[in-house]
Image: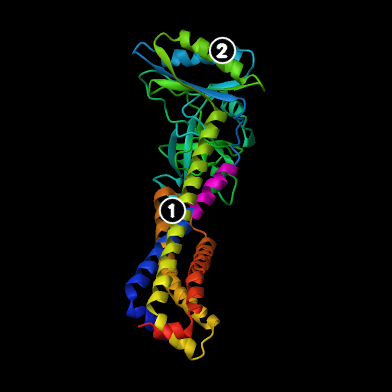
């Protein structure tokens, strides 16, 4: 039985609608399969990434004014004094954002004024001299902020731009890949000198690279509220949190507690979100793969049913069962190849769009190759059973069928 490609293509041309629909289905399935697998991989990597923070012993309490009489600056000072004197507290600070969460700010930094040269996005945190200590983060190089460098919040006045900052090692490496960042000047809304490089930790997660964080020596409060970040001694977190909430609830008659969360709870929520996205994408991809296989199975079954006489004739002329099976598998492979070629282009276009709009890392081409091979193998398995059924048709019965 001849397996030349030209007769097979001619056979598909006689009934192109089914083949075109299956090829289109294969292309869409491949595009979704590859990009979904890539997204799932990124989510799994996020689950495995260390936070760089002492999440076990740390909690946050967010305070907001309920009236114009709320004095943010006085409240911040009073709260910090109380918390730092509280038994079981290792360190406490006021912060403009919450690490690991979407609560915070983000900025773009450049090496040269006027937004020129190498640049990098970074999450922002404003904290005082106990900020790094509260997070449980140490410095790799340079020094921490001194108490006299902390810019206090003054109601009704805009704090001057911070002239000195601390950055994480990841941000320092992105801005200065070939040199030491310590003592260098970077530019955003104003020039600032890097006085310290900290070990990597996850700041607010707002689209910047996960470990890119810049810390300003500024007390927050310009929006009428602030967040207290507190680290307890080991095993004392829950007891300290209860006492802190009881004090804060009655100490500010013109303020309210908006949130009180442990960083371990926030981490579980982040992990849960990543895990749920990975599971959902896996299920959707599996369903699309199953539907694609049904399409290939249906097309092969239809081709077998419409060519019974042709199959019988070839069997009567000496074609073996293996030849019949091979014929339909090669025919299926042609449809799969056309779909895989179109699907590869579509997958790359979608991957590029995700990279541009959602900062997803560029697609690893190994995923594209693996997806195409996987879909081809599964598609051939779907065509295997109808092809075997065709091979079992007796020549005598086939030649009597009109």
Write down the quadrant of residue 109 in the picture: top left
- Indicate yes or no whether the magenta region holds residue 64: no
Residue at the spot of label 1: 355
Tell which tag, 2 or 1, sits nearer the viewer: 2
Residue 230 appears in the rendering: yes
Q: Main secondary structure of the magenta part?
A: helix
- Label 2: how many Cα within 10 Å (few below 14, some 14–19, many 20+): few
Q: Secondary structure at mark 2?
A: helix
* Dot placed on the residue nearer the N-terminal end, 2 or 1: 2
| Image x and y of residue 251, in percent | 47, 8
| Image x and y of residue 332, in percent | 45, 73
Query: Residue shown at 53%/64% (left/top)?
Result: 374
Q: Are marks 2 and 1 in contact (CB under 8 Å)?
A: no
- Indicate yes or no whether the magenta region holds residue 46: yes
**Magenta segment:** 37-48
Say above or below: 15 vs 175. below
Write down the quadrant of residue 341 in the picture: bottom left
Q: Nearer the viewer, residue 52 or 43?
A: 43
Residue at the spot of label 2: 243
């Amino acid at each position: 039985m001849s397996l030349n490609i030209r007769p097979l293509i001619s056979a598909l041309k006689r009934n192109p609608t089914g083949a075109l629909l299956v090829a289109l289905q294969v292309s869409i399935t491949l595009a979704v399969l590859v990009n979904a697998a890539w997204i799932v991989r990124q989510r799994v990597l996020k689950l495995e990434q260390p936070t760089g923070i002492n999440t076990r012993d740390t909690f946050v309490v967010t305070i907001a004014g309920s009236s114009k009489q709320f004095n943010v600056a006085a409240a911040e000072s009073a709260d910090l004094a109380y918390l730092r004197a509280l038994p079981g507290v290792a360190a406490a600070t006021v912060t403009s954002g919450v690490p690991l969460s979407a609560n915070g700010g983000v900025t773009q930094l450049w090496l040269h004024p006027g937004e020129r040269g190498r640049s990098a996005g970074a999450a922002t945190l404003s904290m005082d001299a106990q900020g790094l200590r509260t997070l449980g983060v140490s410095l790799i190089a340079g020094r921490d902020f001194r108490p006299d460098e902390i810019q206090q919040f003054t109601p009704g006045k805009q704090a001057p731009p911070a002239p000195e900052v601390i950055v994480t090692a990841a941000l320092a490496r992105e801005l200065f890949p070939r040199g030491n960042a310590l003592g260098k000047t970077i530019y955003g809304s104003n020039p600032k000198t890097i006085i310290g490089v900290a070990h990597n930790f996850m700041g607010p997660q707002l689209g910047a690279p996960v470990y890119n964080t810049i810390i300003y020596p500024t007390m927050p409060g310009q929006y009428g509220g602030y967040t207290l970040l507190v680290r307890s001694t080991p095993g004392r977190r829950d007891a300290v949190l209860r006492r802190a909430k009881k004090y804060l609830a009655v100490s500010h008659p013109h303020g309210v507690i908006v949130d009180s969360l442990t960083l371990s709870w926030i981490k579980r929520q982040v992990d849960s979100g990543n895990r749920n996205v990975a599971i959902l994408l896996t299920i959707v991809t599996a369903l699309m793969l199953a539907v694609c296989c049904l399409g290939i199975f249906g097309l092969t079954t239809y081709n077998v049913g419409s060519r019974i006489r042709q199959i019988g004739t070839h069997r009567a002329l000496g074609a073996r069962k293996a030849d019949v099976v091979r014929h339909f598998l090669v025919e299926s492979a042609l449809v799969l190849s056309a779909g895989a070629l179109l699907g590869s282009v579509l997958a790359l276009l979608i991957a590029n769009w995700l990279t541009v709009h959602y900062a997803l890392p560029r697609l690893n081409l190994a995923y594209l190759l693996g997806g195409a091979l996987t879909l081809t193998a599964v598609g051939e398995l779907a065509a295997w059973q109808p092809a075997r059924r065709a091979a079992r048709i007796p020549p005598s019965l086939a030649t009597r069928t009109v």
